[in-house]
Image: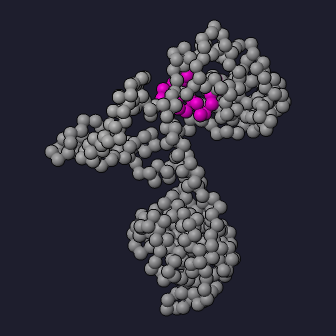
Amino acid sequence: MFIEIPRANFRRLPFDHCSLSLQPFEYPMCTVDGVVFDLMSIVPWIKKFGTNPITGEVFHAYSVFLSCTLGKYHCPVLYTVFTNNSHIVANKVTGNVFSYEAVEQLNIKTKSYKDLLTDEPFTRQDLITLQDPTNLDKFNVSDFFHVKNNMKVLDPAEEKAKQSPSYHLKSTNMETRETLAELYRDYKGDELLASTMKEPEAKKTDKLNAAHYSTGRVSASFTSTAMAPATTHEADAISDDTVRYQYVKKKGYVRLHTNKGDVNVELHCDKVPKAGENFIKLCKKGYYDGTIFHRSIRNFMIQGGDPTGTGTGGESYWGKPFKDEFRPNLSHTGRGILSMANSGPNTNKSQFFITFRSCTYLDRKHTVFGRVVGGLETLTAMENVESDPKTDKPKSEIKLLSTSVFVDPYEEADAQVSICMQFHICCVFMPCH
């Protein structure tokens, strides 16, 4: 809960304090007007009110402070420590903060509008004044919208306590307290009611998973007497994986440690996210450790990923087959293409193969999800191992000893989705520097 502030004609807020909690900030964010908030204070406010606590208007973009290792804020160019009398500006493009003296001497007077730290170009309109000692109206606490209107965000524990009827009982006698205690101890009406009226829970929609089409319940209830009447169109919910995969923008990288040497593979997680995630998750799980390549055909491919070593076993990370992911720009062209083995359409599990040469006739039959980017000599050594002409099984064992995941883009995607789901915002704040 935020502290109560006594009314005054003018009360200055220090530049290193949050304009909402009126306490020193830990994770500073600022508006384009140069008003600074703490992340942990402004996010609950946005969720509840959706307005600017200072002006009452809606928020737009945010920038970030740059702090030094001493715990005090300073100009990263002139190394002068900021005080309540410093003229401080921020670059909206990069989020970097400087003293106005540095920007004036090195940017404005020279007409060279490039960030003094990153050399990124900007315009003079991108400069945000965080503090001007000649104009302190912005720091007048008495003029803040949330102070004048006594608006605040309550502590979650207090909000939850308010839902109980007993919260509003200021004082009760002994008999009333004993009666209420007995009622709360023995009352089971809500449980019985919930058990008799339980309905299947519909997946809740939000800004992330709301589809552009409705659930169709209105039309269904209009034409079917078996459904309860519905008069409100609700957006259907997109599957969780579809939402997550929108945030997967990078390649994955894994090293396969075999008894013939190491093979580095690049995974097309940004193009075939399901197959890429299946392979990475199985590698991190140790699923492939100690498995053999049970099939090898010279000038064609080598196949592995089956823990049983028979060519008929293996499960996907989710325990069930997943659909094919065919992309026109991913083809079985060249040596070292990593692709999913299957027993028919949409039957991908854990088995995979690596090509020894182009085999484009497998396009749209097998999902290409990666390629070899290092260790081609190891691939050659594996190809040179003779195989049984009847079973195509290598005569000497080719074993996948272990795997090392270097880059997992799904971890970053999950983190972004988690933040957006928690705060109900997307790309509102700029990253810290």
Between 345 and 99, the residue placed more toward the observer is 99
Question: Residue 213 occupies which quadrant of the picture?
Answer: top left
Range of magenta residues: 35-53
Residue 114 visible: no
Between 110 and 349, the residue placed more toward the observer is 349
Residue at 63%, 81% (x, y): give it.
382
Say whether residue 17 is left or right of residue 214: right
- Quarter that holds the C terminus: top right
| Position of 2 relative to 389 (above/below) | above
Instruction: Identify the coloring.
Output: one colour
| Position of 207 relative to 42 (above/below) | below
Residue at 15%, 45% (x, y): give it.
225
Residue 219 visible: yes
Residue 302 percent coordinates (x, y): 56, 79
Residue 34 percent coordinates (x, y): 65, 24
| Position of 69 relative to 295 (above/below) | above
Residue at 70%, 32% (x, y): give it.
65
Residue at 58%, 51% (x, y): give it.
412
Decide whether residue 243 is among the magenta residues.
no
Residue 191 percent coordinates (x, y): 30, 44
Between 342 and 4, the residue placed more toward the observer is 4
Q: Residue furthest top?
A: 9
Question: Residue 384 occupies which quadrant of the picture?
Answer: bottom right
Decide whether residue 39 is among the magenta residues.
yes
Say whether residue 127 is left or right of residue 388: right
